[in-house]
Image: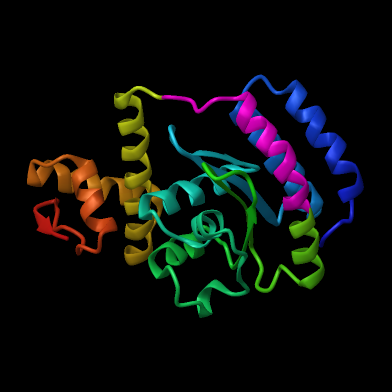
Amino acid sequence: MAQDSSLTTSDQMQDLLLESPGFPEFLLGLATISASLLGSDGLVTCTITVERDGGPATVASSSEEGRRLDETQYAFDDGPCLTAARQQRLVLIPDLKSDQRWSDYLDAALREGVRSVLAVPIPTDPFSHAGLNCYASTVGAFNEATIALLGQHAAAMSRVLRIALRLHGAEIHPDHLRAALKSRAVVDAAVSLIMLQQHGGREGALEVLQLAAKSGNRRMQDIATDIVRGAALPGTQRDGGQE
């Protein structure tokens, strides 16, 4: 899977930093470059996660699936990728079905078709944490050669990322926008859990939340928060019957 193009990515990353209009666009480019190291078959999604004091976390993904996975992980505020970034240690999960850590999040990832995960820390500075997160649709996708290559890649990213953090200050979102982003992540996480429990699709899971909010006269975000924290699915009325 791994392609040893590490000799050229340092120049690519420097060019990316010079050409990117903002920090999110720079991270998106890093995620895309990282995914390209692992082949062009689209079986691996890469995301870059950056947390720093004074501002919200910034996440960029090489695919929409990766964005949803990272948002779900932030709703739980725990998982392999956040552990790698915050504790600065590599996390490898060869098979999500046989791993007992972060069980709720891993169940949600399995629902998205993920079977193995590799999260590699990216050294930055004392006031920030970063990690490269790789999601694969096959078991045992990350062998020793791939792990070594991504470790070297993360080390190469470290220098240019530290420069980018100094050039681009933390983006301060208004409180109402920050609350809206958090609300969306919590609802997405609850939807994933409902899909798992009911073996249904995303639209049906959203309808369950909407009906529960209507019947209980509560906000959908509050019900989603309860579900993420372990509460049973609320009863909802449909066609005169109890679900």
Q: Position of residue 23 (x, y in %)?
A: 61, 28
Q: Is residue 159 left or right of residue 218?
A: right
Specify whether residue 44 is in view.
Answer: yes
Q: Quadrant of residue 231?
A: bottom left
Residue at (27% x, 46% y) in the render: 207
Q: Is residue 204 left or right of residue 238?
A: right
Q: Position of residue 196 (x, y in %)?
A: 38, 64
Residue 155 in the magenta stretch? The answer is yes
Q: Which is nearer the eye, 11 or 188?
A: 11
Assign the C terminus to one quadrant of the image: bottom left
The vertical placement of 4 against 25, above or below, is below
The vertical placement of 35 against 101, above or below, is above
Residue segment shown in magenta = 153-172
Assign the N terminus to one quadrant of the image: bottom right
Q: Position of residue 134 (x, y in %)?
A: 64, 56
Residue 78 in the magenta stretch? The answer is no
Residue at (35% x, 22% y) in the render: 174
